[in-house]
Image (spheres, rainbow, N blue to C red):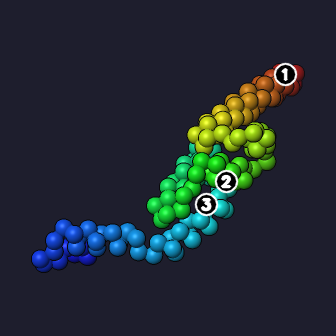
Amino acid sequence: MSQILEDESDAANVWLRLHNIFQDNKNSRALYHQRQFNTIRLDDFPNCTVYCQEIKSLADQLRNVGDNVNDDRMVLQLIAGLNDNFGTVGTYFTQLDKLPSFYYARSKLILDETRKKKQASNNSMPINAALIANSSSITDAH
């Protein structure tokens, strides 16, 4: 507060100081956020939800410094950062005549991740059950 309020400050001066604090180093922040946005990768996050949240957060931060990040740019970056596990989703999006909205792409990506986790869980259960059955029959034979 001491950076903003001074003796005999009027509302216009306080507002100007506030504006200057938030606009300070605007170009440096823009460059930093652009670099982060352009290098974001799914492999750096625990799941697709967190990955998409970070893309959205970085896009918002870029907008705050005057960089107009539109939906197409967000979707293209989402696709560019996917790993081989989600390559088919990325390929599907790029083959469409028009890119989907970011929220639609996010929804489909998370749905695919959920399906893959469920499939992996279902595939691992019969193998475990077979191992238990085999080990039981071996110990019973002795």
- The x and y percentages for residue 45 are 62, 52
In which quarter of the view is residue 107 placed?
A: top right
Closer to the chain start, of discs 1 and 2, is 2
User: Which amino acid is tagged 2?
Assistant: Gln
Task: Bin the neighbour count of mark 2 within 10 Å (Cα to Cα): few under 14, some 14-19, many 20 and up.
Answer: some
Q: Are marks 1 and 2 in contact (CB under 8 Å)?
A: no
- The x and y percentages for residue 119 are 74, 30
Labels 3, 1: front one? 3
Residue corresponding to mark 2: 77
Q: From where the camera sits, is residue 136 visible?
A: no
Q: Quadrant of the N terminus?
A: bottom left
Give the answer, above or below, for where 57 lies relative to 115: below
- The x and y percentages for residue 91 are 79, 43
Q: Which mark is residue 137?
A: 1
Residue nearest the observer in this picture, 27 or 12:
12
Residue nearest the observer in this picture, 64 or 39:
64
- The structure residue drawn at horizontal position 70% and vertical position 31%, both measured from the top left corner, is 115
Judging from the image, what secondary structure is the residue with disc 2 in?
helix
Residue corresponding to mark 3: 37
Q: Residue furthest left?
A: 8
Judging from the image, what secondary structure is the residue with disc 3 in?
helix
- The x and y percentages for residue 99 are 69, 42
- The structure residue drawn at horizontal position 75% and vertical position 50%, both measured from the top left corner, is 83
User: In the shown orientation, is residue 124 left or right of residue 12?
Assistant: right
User: Which amino acid is tagged 1?
Assistant: Ser
User: In the shown orientation, is residue 53 left or right of residue 7?
Assistant: right
Label 1 to label 2: alpha-carbon separation = 53 Å
Label 2 to label 3: alpha-carbon separation = 8 Å
User: Which amino acid is tagged 3?
Assistant: Phe
Q: Quadrant of the C terminus?
A: top right
- The structure residue drawn at horizontal position 18% and vertical position 67%, both measured from the top left corner, is 11
Q: Are marks 2 and 3 in contact (CB under 8 Å)?
A: yes
